[in-house]
Image: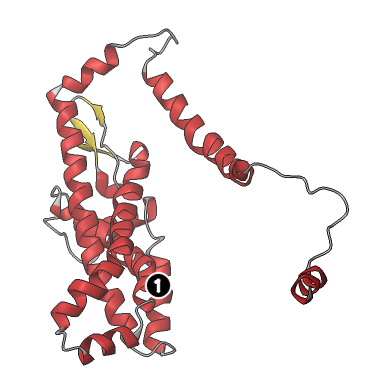
Amino acid sequence: MAVAATTETGARPSRAGRRLSAPSWVGTVPFLGYVAIFLLWPTGIVVVDALKNPNGAWAFSNITELGNPLVRGYFIGSFKLCLISSLLGAVFGAILAYAVASGDPDGTVRRLYLAVSGVLAQFGGVTLAFAFLVVIGPVGLLFHASWFYSFPWGITVIYAYFQIPLMVLVFLPAIDGLKVQWREASENLGASAWQYWRHVGGPLLAPAFLGGTLLLSRTRCRPLRPSGPGRTRSPTSCRSRSVSRCPVRSG
């Protein structure tokens, strides 16, 4: 009887009225609407327009252009530039981010480097092309770089100007998330530095590193497009996302 009384006393009183229940997916409606308007809709417009001729009629002859060796060369060259620039930017950016994270968290060097990285990560497009053209281009104020128009290595150096700082900003929070206690615990258990990075640090940083690499490749690299017989748009003049607005250079 005592147990029953205690149970009845501790029972919560029932609330008046009924709570309205909503499906669990209702919270994703704003996100799905954003994706549909700003991602799926523009993509659908591009796909539909690609299958039409200038008069607006359906024409699938554009698909046959994918077999053109010239068009294939643009895609292959864009893929090479994307792969090389994103990997180099990710590796060097990760190394610099680790060097910055190893210093004083409130030090002047860290704050200065983060401020500079934030500026350089946004320094791209026409402004980046103009800066390199003026400084080391054909009419460079300092000198004329022979590698300026070389593909893909010369352009990769120009891309690294903003890709490395961007990787630093993306990868630094992941490095800050590594706790010192994890390193101390591995050392107390007899693990070497290589074993720590292989079994602890590496797996923890791998998602952030891969995500940063995909960010560099996704937002910076798109297929180059021909602009006329014997002429191509130079990818040095802008990020690949705006390559359709690049200046034309003789091939």
Disc 1 secondary structure class: helix
Q: Which residue is mark 1?
A: 173
Quarter of the image where one finds residue 148: bottom left
Quarter of the image where one finds residue 67: top left
- Foreground: 135 or 47? 47
Question: Would you place residue 194 above or below residue 37 in this image?
Answer: below
Count of number-bearing discs: 1
Left or right: residue 111 versus residue 15 is: left
Whether residue 49 is visible here, answered yes or no, is: yes
- Foreground: 128 or 73? 73
Question: Which residue extends farthest front?
Answer: 1
At x 35%, y 9%, the residue is: 59
Quarter of the image where one finds residue 94: bottom left
Q: Amino acid at mark 1?
A: Pro
Residue 221 location (% of width, % of height): 29, 45
**Colour scheme of this structure image?**
secondary structure
Residue 144 location (% of width, % of height): 16, 59
Whether residue 136 is visible here, answered yes or no, is: no
Residue 132 location (% of width, % of height): 27, 58
